[in-house]
Every structure is written in structure tokens, then in C-alpha cells.
Amino acid sequence: MMYPRTIYSRIKAHLGTKSVVVLTGMRRTGKTTILKHILSEIRSDNKAYFDLEKISDREFFDRKNYDSILLDLAQRGLEPKKKLYLCIDEIQFLPNITSVIKYLYDHHRIKFFATGSSSYYLKNLFTQSLAGRKIVFELFPLDFCEFLTFKDVPHREGSFLKNAFSRAEYERLRFYYEEFIEFGGFPEVVLTKSKVLKKEMLNDIISSYINIDIQSLADFRKGKDIYNLIKMLASRCATRLDYSKLASMSGLSRPTVESYVDFFEKTYLITRVPVFTRNTDREIVKARKIFFCDNGLMGILAQNSSGVLFENALFNQLRHKGEVRYYALKDGSEIDFILDGTMALEAKESPTGVDLNTLARLSRIAKLKKIHLVGRYEVPRFNDYIWGGAIR
């Protein structure tokens, strides 16, 4: 069964365009499922699917004479002289695939759809070879609204700007939101009922990331050092990055740590959130905060507090709404998130009126008029408070 993803309608809108449609994101976020569903909805028999994880499919495109690919497609019963649809999965396994796609795109009527597990590969190679010929979509683990869809739980497409949320709705969805915070949004994890199996799947995802993605995309060879650094980062989620301290604790040089962290971000494992600043004399300017792509993945790497888990889940919901930053004064006062430079959001598991007053005070300093205090647990209603599960 194909559960709809929010991004799918945007991808489908490009079915009739010439552009190469590229879908990228971390491993196991559902790219292949979307690709195959796109293929099934194309009203033509002149189409084919290739998975470059398979050696045979890799060899099909790995040749010097690109026109010979068309001859082999014809032998498979396709008609190269008519409009042809080709879906190519896991393109990062064949470095020269961009040249193949560019040549066939320029000389034949072929609509390409492709997936890859890393922006590190796609943005470095696709930028030059397919400039002006591609449109890239990034797929992340499920947000809470998609999570409910995968659970077959009826829900309304609410706006996170509306703080009206009935007690009955809160009680109905609270259990699911707690599961979302604990185990995250990787599709196959969400669809699995057993907690033991969920954890096994999450362990397999991080193992695949280290043993397949890192080994195939980077020159890093010290798997144990990489895994230890990832665990250190997981334990520091929602805090400012201190490269010198990470270097000291890991036994790696600072440049090596910075290189690894940069790679982790480019392959969707983490995100570094910059500071929002108007007055450089008062605000901390350089330090970035780190967040993980998925709560479940972070949970098997480190034992974080429930507050950190909630803040990370909130970040992964907000990232779909716009540009996310944070605000900090030199005296240690902070606002967790600034959305699109106009809205302040503070994550509190059990927010109080004092928390709201503090948020309002800091927002005035930052010159932000829109504020929201976001809570995890039900509390007495007051203005500018919203439940985290309503942000979707």
C-alpha cells in the first residue's frame, strides 16, 4: 500500500515537464517507494525501472558508447524513438551516471526520474553536469501529519499558527505523538508495531549509513571513530557545537571533526542551525546548534532527556515550514527557534505563564512580534500557547 507523502503532489506536478526529477534524502525515507509509484501512474508502457544497487543494472549504464544503451532498451521491448520514461534508483552507486543522463536528455525524448541517498553526492556532481536540466526534491522522515496518515489515524490538516485544539483531539492524538517523539518517522519503523523490531530497524539504518553511504561516498575509513563521533553528537543534540571539545574527547584533530560533521550534514544525518542576530554586540554570532534528522535514530545513539527529544521533534516539524534559526544573548538567555526571521517559538514540555513572559521579553529584544510557546503536555490554556502535535 502506498501512503501519500506531502511531497508527492509537488513531484507529480513535474510529470509533464522535461526536467530530470531527482529525489534525494537519507537512506530508508521512502524514495524508492515514491519512485515506483510515480512509474505506476505514468500512462504509458514505454517506461522502465533500474536499481543501481544491482550490479547488472549498474553495468547497463556503465559504458563508453551511450547510444548503445538505447539499443539495449529496444531489446527490452521499449521504443527509444517515442517518449520514454526511465526511473533510476540509487544513482550514487555509479559516478558517471550524470554524464549518461545529460547525453540522453539532450539527444532523445527521455523523461528521467532518479533517486540518491545523499545531497553530498548529488549537489557536488549534479550542479555542474545537469545545470538547468534538473529539479531536486529532498525527502525527510515523516512529519507528524504523515505519521498519522501511515497509522491510518484520521486527522485534519491543521495550521500550526492556530492554537485552538480541543481536549478531545488532544486526548485522541497524544498517544501517537508520544510514539512519534520516541521512535521518529522512518516509514518502515512507523509501520512496525513491535518496539523491539523498531529498535532493530533503527540500528540497521545507522549501520547501513556508516557501512554503505559513508564508505561509498567519502574517503573516511575509520568506522569506529566515525560511529563514536556520531554518538557524541547525538548526546549533544539541541546544544551549540564545540569542535575543540569534540576533538579532545574523540582523539581526532579539529579539522577532521569539522570535516566529518560537514559530511554528516550533507548526508542528512544532522542539521546545524545558525543563530538569528540583529545586534552583534549582544548576541552570540558564530556557534551553531545541532539537531538530528530523526528522534528514533537519535534515541538509539544516546540517552537524551525527554526535553531534548521534544525539542528535536519540534525542530524536524518546523524545518518543513521555513528557515529555522535560534536566538541567544551573551547572558545565556535563548529562544529555541526563530522561523523565517519573524516568529519566535519556545519548546517547553509543561509550559507556564512565566515561560511565556520570558519568551515575550526576549522576543521584544529580538524585535519579533509573533511568538508561540509550544508544549508537549496538556496545560491550562493561555494566549500564544500551542501543543507540539498541532504543528504539522
Image (tube, rainbow, N blue to C red):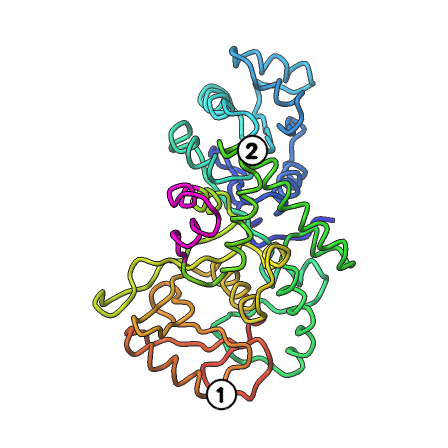
Above or below, 76 against 118 in this view is above
Which is nearer the N-term, disc 1 or disc 2? Answer: 2
Residue bounds of the magenta highlight: 241-259
Q: Residue at x 42, y 29 (%)?
A: 130
Dominant secondary structure of the residues highlighted in magenta in the image: helix
Q: Nearer the viewer, residue 127 or 15?
A: 127
Task: Residue 120: give x, y in percent of width and height.
Answer: 46, 38
Task: Residue 109: give x, y in percent of width and height.
Answer: 51, 24
Query: The disc labelled 2 sits on which kind of residue?
Result: Gln
Task: Residue 218: give x, y in percent of width and height.
Answer: 49, 33
**Badge 1 element:** loop
**Badge 2 element:** helix
Whether the residues at callouts 1 and 2 have beta carbons within 8 Å, the answer is: no
Q: Is residue 195 magenta?
A: no
Q: Residue at x 39, y 72 (%)?
A: 335
- What quarter of the picture does the C terminus occupy? bottom right
Q: Residue furthest right?
A: 194
Task: Residue 137: give x, y in percent of width and height.
Answer: 50, 44
Above or below, 217 against 352 in this view is above
Residue linked to disc 1: 382
Residue linked to disc 2: 215
- Give the class, few, some or many, for how many residues have Cα within 10 Å of label 1's Cα (few <14, many ≥20): few
Q: Nearer the viewer, mark 1 or mark 2?
A: 2
Above or below, 113 against 281 in this view is above
Above or below, 250 against 178 in this view is above
3D distance between C-alphas at marks 1 and 2 = 51 Å
Q: Residue at x 63, y 18 (%)?
A: 73
Q: Residue at x 64, y 56 (%)?
A: 300
Q: Is residue 242 magenta?
A: yes
Query: The disc labelled 1 sits on which kind of residue?
Result: Phe
Q: Quadrant of residue 129?
A: top left
